[in-house]
Image: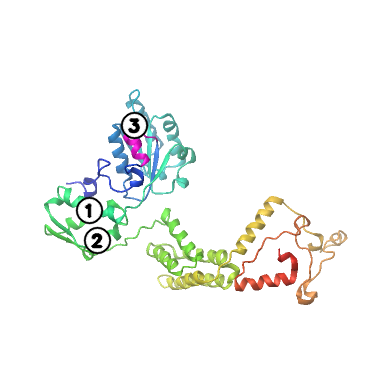
Amino acid sequence: MSKPLAERMRPTTLDDYIGQEHVVGKDAVLRKMIEAGHISSFLLWGPPGVGKTTLAQIIASMLKVPFFTLSAVTSGVKDVREVIERAKQGRFFHSESPILFIDEIHRFSKSQQDSLLGAVEKGIVTLIGATTENPSFEVIRPLLSRCQLYVLKPLEKDDLMKILKRAITEDAELKQKNIKIEETDAMMRYSGGDARKLLNILDMVVKTSTSDDIRVTNQLVENLLQTNPLAYDKDGEMHYDIISAFIKSIRGSDPDAALYWMARMIEGGEDPQFIARRLIISAAEDIGLANPNALLLANAAFDAVMKIGWPEGRIPLAEATVYLATSAKSNSAYKGIDAALAEVRGSGNQPVPLHLRNAPTKLMKSLNYSDGYKYPHDFTGNFTVQQYLPDEIADKRFWYAQHSPAEDKLYQRMVSCWGERYKK
């Protein structure tokens, strides 16, 4: 039984390695270190199928050093220690350190990552870790500080086309067939910048064909796969990237982009309640007092999703998304509460002014609790000037209006009530 096409086509030299020019291109730092014959420990962060494992294997081959590999999914602390011991025994005096490649290093627990520290620090092994998750969240700081970080990008269409051409013209099995790629949109869409997926798709097309004359079209690929092509890990980096893009599109008043990112989440299987909760947060944080109805509509959309379920729930979510994106924006309440929190943390427990305290007992009254309090409804316009903040910060301001039409009305009322205090 032959190996899968993706394995048969795995590059063995940097000249055959396609993509990631910013990391291993002619003048890139990592390539210079490899060609100089010495590398330090590093992490490769990028999506699946962009060449992390392949690059590690090529480096070990070029440096002519032992290559040990562990999968964080199946290996424990015991396995790490055994590999480190083997690396110690197999290293010759003055030779380069063996390479320890750990796939999906983000899945290692803290204790597993701790077990690597000594060997990395002493140079017993050169660590190459591969991760699809943000290392700043998933890799312990001491290990992260001992490693360089290289970010690998999804492969561009030109890179993927080179990989396809190379497979058709160089693979021993594929060369025996007459393969014509007439359309590539479906292959590109389903592969999502993942070279392994791309070659698996081509492999499937070839193996399911009853003829040696193969014409690859979008329809053929779609009929074969019939699956959701979107990459969306609800617990992974892309989850946070897409929700970030969604919220920032609303904040930036771009309803088209906001709908697009929401559609990405929906098609990726995101929990509708998660989307609805984020809309409520955005309504309060980004629209705020510029349009208080936004919070009401976002909350109504959440209720509607809970009542009617899916897929109809996408409609009130879309309605709320467009409304929020097209609304005037203000974060004055958001900034105000953060400023007040900062004051509280900095100035501690300031005493409540006596006139603001309740006096339900005779003792409290004798201590002048509530003495001098002015009941606003007893005055014209239901307002009278009096001090509400503690004495030490009596003149502090936390809320500063942002002059959208709706919020300007609130600001003008404050000016009419407080005068110079709100003109500052």
**On the picture, is 356 further left or further right than 408?**
right
Q: In the image, which is nearer the foreground, mark 2 or mark 3?
A: 2
Q: CA distance from mark 1 to mark 2?
A: 10 Å
Q: Residue 326 at x, y = what percent? A: 50, 71
Q: In the rendered structure, which disc, 1 or 2, sits on the residue that comes first in sequence?
A: 1
Residue 38 part of the magenta-drawn span:
yes
* Colour pattern: rainbow
Q: CA distance from mark 1 to mark 3?
A: 33 Å
Element at label 3: loop
Q: In the image, which is nearer the foreground, mark 1 or mark 3?
A: 1
Judge whether 263 appears above or below 241 on screen.
Answer: below
Picture disc at residue 98: 3
Identify the residue position indicated by label 1 in the image.
Answer: 164
Element at label 1: helix
Quadrant in the picture for the C terminus: bottom right
| Residue count near mark 3 (Cα–Cα under 10 Å), binned few <14, some 14–19, many ≥20 | many
Q: Which residue occupies 68% across, 54% down?
A: 343
The magenta segment is 28-40
- Residue contact at pointers 1 and 2, CB within 8 angstroms: yes
Q: In the rendered structure, which disc, 2 or 3, sits on the residue that comes first in sequence?
A: 3
- Kind of residue at badge 2: Thr
| Residue count near mark 2 (Cα–Cα under 10 Å), binned few <14, some 14–19, many ≥20 | some
Identify the residue position indicated by label 2 in the image.
Answer: 184
Q: CA distance from mark 2 to mark 3?
A: 41 Å
